[in-house]
Every structure is written in C-alpha cells, then in structure tokens.
Image (spheres, rainbow, N blue to C red):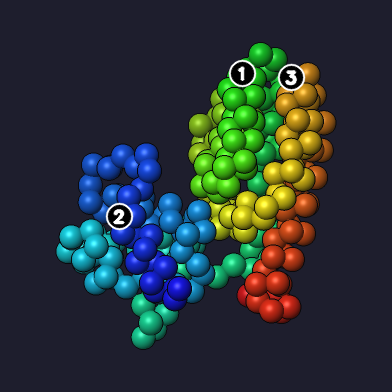
Amino acid sequence: MSRRRAWGVVMAQEQPGFVRPPTTQEAVLAVLRQAILQGAVPPGTPLVQEEIAQRFRLSRVPVREALRRLEGEGHVVYRPRRGYVVAGLTPDDFAELSRLRELLETDAVRRTMARPGSCDLTAMRRLFRDLDAAARDHDPVAYARADRAFHLALVEPAGRAWLTRVVAQVWDACGPYLALLHAAPDHHARERPGYEALLAAVAAYDAERVLALLGERRARAIAAVTTALRDRDGGAVRHP
C-alpha cells in the first residue's frame, strides 16, 4: 500500500472514542495529530490540503491552520513545492526527547514520591492490566494509550499543572517513536517485569528506585528505536 493510500485509509476510518472539539480546526487537528502520534501515518507521507478538506467536507482554511499547528509542534514539516509532509524520525531527536523526559519526570516523580498516598495505585494496576490486554489483543493503539496514562499517573500527583502539561507534550512527541516499539510482538513480554517493578517501587514511595527504573526504560527505548530505524532504513540510520 502506498503512503498516500495509507493516509487515505486512515482518514476514511472512524476514530474510536473521538469526541468532536468545538471548532472544525480543532477537530481536524485532533484527528491528524492522533494518526501521526500513533504511527498510522508514516514519516514522509504528504498531507495534501485539498484531499484532507474533501474527506472532512470542509474548506481548506481549517485544514491549513491545523497543519500550521502541527508544524509548530514538530509533527509535520513544510517542503517547498511539496507542501506539508509528516516529519521524519531520527535517533538524535528521540534521544533529545528522552533527555527532556528525564529532566521533567525526575522533578515530578520526586514531588509525587514526597507525598505518600498521592498515587492512585488502583488506577495504575488497572492500567497495567490494560497493557496486558492490549498486548494480548495485538492492539498498539490501546497499548499506547494505557502506556501514556500509566506514566502520567506518576506525574499528575506532583500537583504542578504546567509540569504535567509539558511532560504530556513531550510524551506525545515521542509517540511515533514509541509506536515502532509497540509494534514488536515481544515488546510487552520484555517490558512487563519493569512495569511490575515500577508498581512495587511506587507502592513503597521509593523515589530513587522509581527514577532508576524509568531511566532503564528510557535507555532500552533509545537503543531499540535506533535499531528499529536502522532496520527500517536498510542499515543506515539518518541523522539531522
């Protein structure tokens, strides 16, 4: 299936659980962002304004504004004579995003762990079961959703709204990279012990142990993403 056709298929599908925002621009933005973050639209895919507008039965104005927003978020780039395309993935970018996550999550986790009883362990255990179910059902979209919620459950109790918001934005920027990992059949089997260890460390409010486990996960993710991109690109890892 060509990239352009793959994009058309995504646009033609209903978006599960999608609640239409109050404006058409936000509706277009939400669908495009979700498709990109979940890896449903490959890097380099052209985002043709006319085609998207026709599928949404809208004028080009809200589509153009949504694409500009996505460009500002780093999810798409504008190429002269080509228009907007989905941004490429590089190991260096993912390593930088992972470093940002480390800085932000370290502060958030220390704040959370300093407040015993602040974490909703029942919700985190439920999300862990959701990860098991998504892996069993081979549902990478559900897996990504549960994985994101699990990690944000460590950040939100810190009680810092802006910190939580920025962590969520950085996590979402990692989405296309994480989608490469979630697609691997044995990904959850390899990561499951780490989730169990995280739950135990959170239950004990052991900040250093939680941070060490998160650091190990980030390091594994960087190595796996580098390998996945190298394999995808035929042995040559692209750098900016």
Residue at the bottom extreme of this rendering = 81
Question: Mark 2 or mark 1: which comes first in sequence?
Answer: 2
Q: Which mark is residue 122?
A: 1
- Asked which quadrant contains residue 78, the reply is bottom left
State how far apart marks 2 and 1 are (Cα). Answer: 35 Å
Residue 135: percent from the left, percent from the top?
Answer: 62, 42
- Quadrant where the C terminus sits is bottom right
**Left or right: 180 with respect to 18?**
right
Q: Secondary structure at mark 2?
A: helix
Do tag 1 and tag 3 residues touch (Cβ < 8 Å)?
no
Q: Are marks 2 and 1 in contact (CB under 8 Å)?
A: no
Q: Residue shown at 47%/59% (left/top)?
A: 40
Residue occupying image coordinates x 74% and y 19% = 203
Q: Which residue is mark 3?
A: 203
Percent x, y for residue 191? 74, 43
Identify which residue is drawn at 74% across, 43% down: 189
Is label 1 in a helix, a strand or a loop? helix
Query: Where does label 2 land, which residue?
Result: 28
The kind of residue tagged 1 is: Thr
Query: For the residue marked with disc 3, what is the amino acid?
Result: Ala
Inter-mark Cα distance, 3 to 2:
40 Å
Task: In the rendered view, tell whether residue 225 sits above or below residue 49.
Answer: above
Q: Nearer the viewer, residue 154 or 142?
A: 142
Disc 3 on helix, strand or loop? Answer: helix
Spatial CA distance of label 1 from label 3 is 10 Å
State which tag comes first along the sequence, 1 or 3. 1
**Image point (62%, 41%), residue name:** 136
Q: How many marks?
A: 3
